[in-house]
Amino acid sequence: MSKTLAPVLGGAAGAVVLVVLVIVILWFCLCRNRNVSRTSDTGSSDQSMQLGRNTGFELTLREAKRFSMEELFSATKDFNDRNLIGEGKFGEVYKGLLHDGMLVAIKKRPGAPSQEFIEEVRYLTSVQHRNLVNLLGYCQENGQQILVYEYIPNGSVSVHLYGAGHVSKEKLEFKHRLSIAIGAAKGLAHIHSISPRLVHKDFKTANVLVDENFIAKVADAGVRNFLGRGDIPSSSSQKAADEMFLAPEVREFRHFSDKSDVYSFGVFLLELMSGQEAMKLLSSDSNQNLVEWVQNCQDSGNLPAIIDQRLGNRFTTEGMEEYVQLIVLCVDPSSERRPVMNYVVMELDRILEKEMNLTTVMGEGTPVVTLGSQLFRAIK
């Protein structure tokens, strides 16, 4: 009897192993296809500056927290207008207080329940970093699609630089601005390093927030993936301002990549240096591309005219010139010639370290330039 059963049991075990192998192979193929589909519109063709590209890690997806509509109504006092703090591409943004005492930013828009929405939320909630505004969860009820983020108290960098009536009383010194730039660069570098890779697609100064310690956190990473019919129309002036951050290949072909994020970051660096919107800086030279405009300002000795006067002379000429050269690299019209974000992080770190070493602090914390020529000497 045992001799009769042995071949049968052996054959059954072999069949089970074969089935398991087939399932594993199919699962691997499906995951690979998902990775390819996520990066199909984000992969860079550049092969010349792949610094840090091998530092990526496989993202482990986790279940996104599902908030109830009742919980969010309570957090926002029934979405009271007094808690409305803005309106972005996804929809209205409300400040909320959860039952556990946590402050959150709640973004909502009309939308039918969708499994695709949940899967995208699950992906984005898995992307966590110190320099990102982290997505906590979602809600899909009553014809609404809602995203729940951590709340960042100090608002956007754009408000502190040029926000109407909200200019920061504290002067953001060059070293402080470099620190903010480094934080934002690290946030972008992180989303570019994960697998499947995430491209921001809407990076701009208004999407860099600062917390109570002025640590920069990149907001709305991946939010464009939700857009479509739910995309709210922008005013013509806002649309023009946002267009300034779009790389040439995005404006012409709608081709987003990690290198188009780098271009947007270069425009952010320009606004951080000038304290003005890039659109206003270029208003009289609208036919000139950004890199030519910056280089012309540098070559003609007109660079001091676009540096934020609030900076005074509290920076080294050497540091500022290297910073401008980094802007030129980032906004190169050719995506292949732009650096990757890991390189940008290293350059900003190097500039900040040198800036700290070449300046001393005297009196009431007023830095004195110890090296470098007087950039503003010719200006009366």
Image (tube, grey):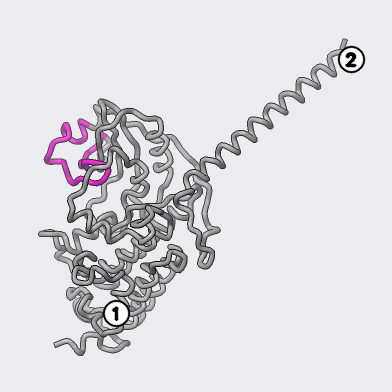
| Residue matched to label 1 | 296
- Does residue 358 appear left or right of residue 50 in this picture? left
Closest to the observer, 292 or 302 = 292
Label for residue 3? 2
Closest to the observer, 122 or 282 = 282
Range of residues picked out in magenta: 73-99
| Percent of width and height locating residue 47 | 54, 64
- Does residue 374 appear left or right of residue 16 in this picture? left
Asked if residue 211 can be seen in this view, the reply is no
1 or 2: tag closer to the N-terminus? 2
- Does residue 107 appear left or right of residue 331 in this picture? left
Query: Which corner quadrant holds the N terminus?
Result: top right
Image height of 88 relative to 145, above or below: below
Q: Quadrant of residue 258?
A: bottom left
Q: Secondary structure at mark 2?
A: helix
Q: Secondary structure at mark 1?
A: helix
Query: Which corner quadrant holds the C terminus?
Result: bottom left
- Marks 1 and 2 close (CB-CB < 8 Å): no
